[in-house]
Image (cartoon, rainbow, N blue to C red):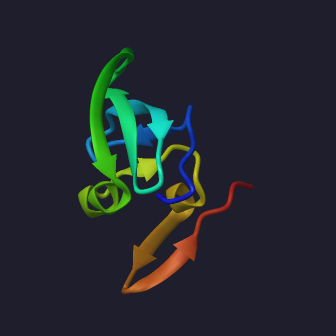
C-alpha cells in the first residue's frame, strides 16, 4: 500500500472501488466507494492493509495462497 499514488483505484474486499484523491507521508484520502466524485475518508497505510484492501492492477492481484505458499498467476 505504501506505493500508492493519486489516481490509483483501491479495491475493497467485497469488490467496491474507491479512487485515491491525495497521498501524504503516512496517510491518503479516498473517494466514496463506487462514487469517485465524492470525498470519502482519510486512512493510514496500515489501516488499509489491515482491512485487506488492494490497489487495482497491482502485483498483489495476481497472487494466491495455497497451503501456506504464495503462487503468482500468469495469463497464457
- Which residue extends farthest front? 25
Rendered-image quadrant of the C terminus: bottom right
Q: Is residue 36 left or right of residue 8?
A: left
Residue at coordinates 27% horizontally, 57% vertically from top-left?
47
Q: Which of the pair 36/12 is nearer the observer?
A: 36
The outermost residue toward the bottom is: 68
Picture coordinates of residue 75 (x, y %)?
69, 55
Q: Residue furthest right?
A: 76
Tell me: residue 5, above or below residue 34: below
Foreground residue, 46 or 16? 46
Q: Residue at x 58, y 53 (%)?
A: 58
Query: Left or right: 51 with respect to 30?
Result: left
Q: Position of residue 46 (x, y in %)?
A: 32, 63
Residue 51, by quadrant, is bottom left
Viewer-closest of 62 and 66: 62
- Above or below: residue 41 compared with residue 48: above
Q: Position of residue 45 (x, y in %)?
A: 37, 57
Instruction: Name the residue at 47% across, 47% down.
Output: 24
Q: Is residue 29 above or below residue 26?
A: above
Amino acid at each position: 500500500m505504501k506505493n500508492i499514488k493519486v489516481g490509483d483505484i483501491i479495491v475493497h474486499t467485497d469488490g467496491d472501488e474507491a479512487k485515491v484523491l491525495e497521498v501524504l507521508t503516512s496517510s491518503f484520502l479516498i473517494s466514496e466507494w463506487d462514487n469517485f466524485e465524492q470525498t470519502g475518508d482519510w486512512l493510514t497505510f496500515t489501516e488499509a492493509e489491515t482491512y485487506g484492501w488492494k490497489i487495482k492492477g497491482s502485483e498483489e492481484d495476481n497472487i494466491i495462497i495455497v497451503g501456506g505458499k504464495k503462487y503468482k498467476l500468469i495469463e497464457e
